[in-house]
Amino acid sequence: MCGIVGAVSTRNIVPVLVQGLQRLEYRGYDSCGVAVHDASLEGNQGSGLHRARSTARVAELMEQVTKEHLQGATGIAHTRWATHGAPAVHNAHPHFSVGPGVGDAHAAGRVGLVHNGIIENHEALRAALQAKGYEFLSQTDTEVIAHLVDSHYNGDLFDAVQAAIKELRGAYAIAVMHKDEPHRVVGARAGSPLILGVGQNENFLASDAMALAGVTDQIVYLAEGDMVDLQIGRYWIVNQVGKTMEAGERPVKTVRAHSGAVELGPYRHYMQKEIFEQPRAIAETLEGVVSVVPELFDGADGTAAWRVFKEIDNVLILACGTSYYSGCAAKYWIEGLAGIPCNVEVASEYRYRKSVPNPRSLVVTISQSGETADTLAALRHAQGLGMTNTLTICNVATSAMVRECKLAYITRAGVEIGVASTKAFTTQLAGLFLLTLALGQAKGKITESESDHYLEQMRHLPVALQAVLALEPQVVSWAEDFARKNNALFLGRGIHYPIALEGALKLKEISYIHAEAYPAGELKHGPLALVDSEMPVVTVAPNDELLEKLKSNMQEVRARGGVLYVLADANTDIENAPGIHVIRMPEHYGALSPILHVVPLQLLSYHTALARGTDVDKPRNLAKSVTVE
Ligand code: HGA
């Protein structure tokens, strides 16, 4: 989603700002922009704020700034994923305020601002500012903040921003500069992430440490409600009650954000790279797991997981999108193996419905980035209802989710850039399986030796995944058929129903083919009406206790002329036949089978999208790290 980079330096900072945006491109965006104070650079002519904005890629913004000789040592930059107002140049950030009633909305900017998030009371603020004579040039909620800061400005940018944010309702991370203060950028955050990067005689702001890879690895994570005052070679952080923070209260951490991780290498797309990285990602996620013990889930502050596991009597999983489906699969493990009641809820629904809180719930949030706005809000909602036993399965150790949960398991998928999640999903499943084993032991449902046996099976996953990835040529031949279709059905039973859901989501996301998933037994209760010779039906058919039932459901499809694409395990009697295409998985993998069966579905959506010529890594309308509600 939106990305922010800001800097106060003594050198021309424009290339650093734009390269920072480039590192945030993977999050998805529809426009981008950069603004500098041109008097901030020694030897520069001029005395004001100047900007370049574009609806093209960041690489073209770079060409534009070079052509226009945009230079400055103080600047802010942004990639936008529109929430309010169409993706268009006039809505792209940075937004400027030229002051009220100047009669020329295109006059030189007084305040320049970039924003991630949503201002919920923007309409009321807009009306009040218009009444004061401010003219609006965009449809964004963001522009109100620029004018609001201007309306409070009385010679000190920090004071003006502090006064302005008191009037905001909603979520924001902002970076602001003023024409009368060429060596200053003020940042603030509430509900959206913002970090400070400390360099040699220069300081930076960014929405993600990745933006500063190669620039500085000295990072301060701003807390909810913090404001930061950036000047040359110094900074101050003030917390939400206005207290200036001591160095120890906001420690500088060394964070190695690998810019190498964003290199594509021999692959054509990040999604392809990430699908093929899964054996390594799973191996790294299991690295250091000698045996399954509650300590694996201990909190960063030392909270002991075993105490929590003893106390709880049910599990409530909160997540969105692909992470939600990993939670749906985990429900089968947690109830089936650990014998603990488990509910899974879509975070954006849970946070707004009246539910019956159970203080003995273990609330488990699942998020790749750890910054997913809906999941964070659902977590806080659960905490507000008195459910304080919280655990997250998350891919980013420094994220808000990890900081705000008592317990955590950090997956080691590495940076995931493709918008369609792949390796984050399978590593989440690995983390959730470990959680199941730990909970099962705590409740006396799984013995230590059973747990060791499962762990042995998990260690074999990287090799098993390699064998599944080798099926790619067969999946490509399926993809050629799918590329010509407008609809598809996915069927699964038991724990493979969430895998069917994930397969359908992948196909929708990147190939734009309408796809739905059903538990196979539900077919005859409605969806069977959709089946004809034009409807491909993908069936996830592992060799488990539901296979015979599933075969009857497949017959129901064939009898209506539907064409089946079956992912069967080794040692089953499902054979290729007219209207039945079979890919045989190398082996049956018992309880861990979902982690393997999802991989051909990822490959199917990838190759179908490739055949249809869509933008695989940046599908239309979607973004990575969904940091807005
Ligand atoms: N509401 C602002 C910023 C959107 C955003 O943060 N997206 O991730 C806008 O629409 O410009």
Image (tube, grey):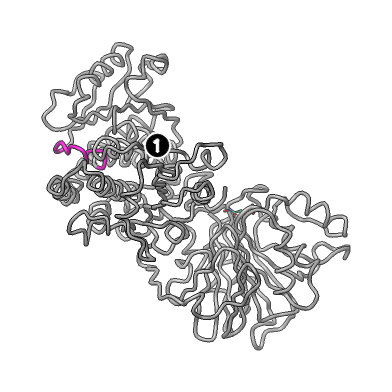
In percent of width and height, residue 553 lies at 28, 17
Q: Name, please, the residue furthest toward the bottom.
A: 43
In the picture, measured across the screen, residue 577 lies left or right of residue 607, that is left
- Count the labels in the image: 1
Is the CB of the residue bearing disc 1 within 8 angstroms of ligand 1? Answer: no
The residue sitting at 82% across, 66% down in the picture is 99
Indicate whether residue 448 is drawn in magenta: no
Q: Label 1: few (<14), some or many (≥20) within 10 Å?
A: some
Looking at the rendering, the stretch of residues picked out in magenta corresponds to 586-595
Residue 413 visible in this rendered orientation of the protein: no
Label 1 is placed on what type of residue? Asn
Element class at badge 1: strand
Question: Magenta segment, principal secondary structure?
Answer: helix
Q: Is residue 453 left or right of residue 255?
A: left
Residue 16 pos. (x, y %): 52, 74
**Residue at 43% across, 56% down:** 405
Whether residue 148 sits left or right of residue 190 in the image: it is right
215 vs 620: above or below: below
Residue at the farthest top position: 559
Identify the residue at image location x=15%, y=49%: 448
Does residue 590 show up magenta in the picture?
Answer: yes
The image shows residue 346 at horizontal and vertical percentages of: 47, 39
Residue found 36% across the figure and 40% down from its top: 314
Q: On the rendered structure, is 129 left or right of 21?
A: right
Query: Is 613 situated above or below 551?
Result: below
Q: Which picture quadrant has residue 17? A: bottom right
Q: Which residue is mark 1?
A: 343
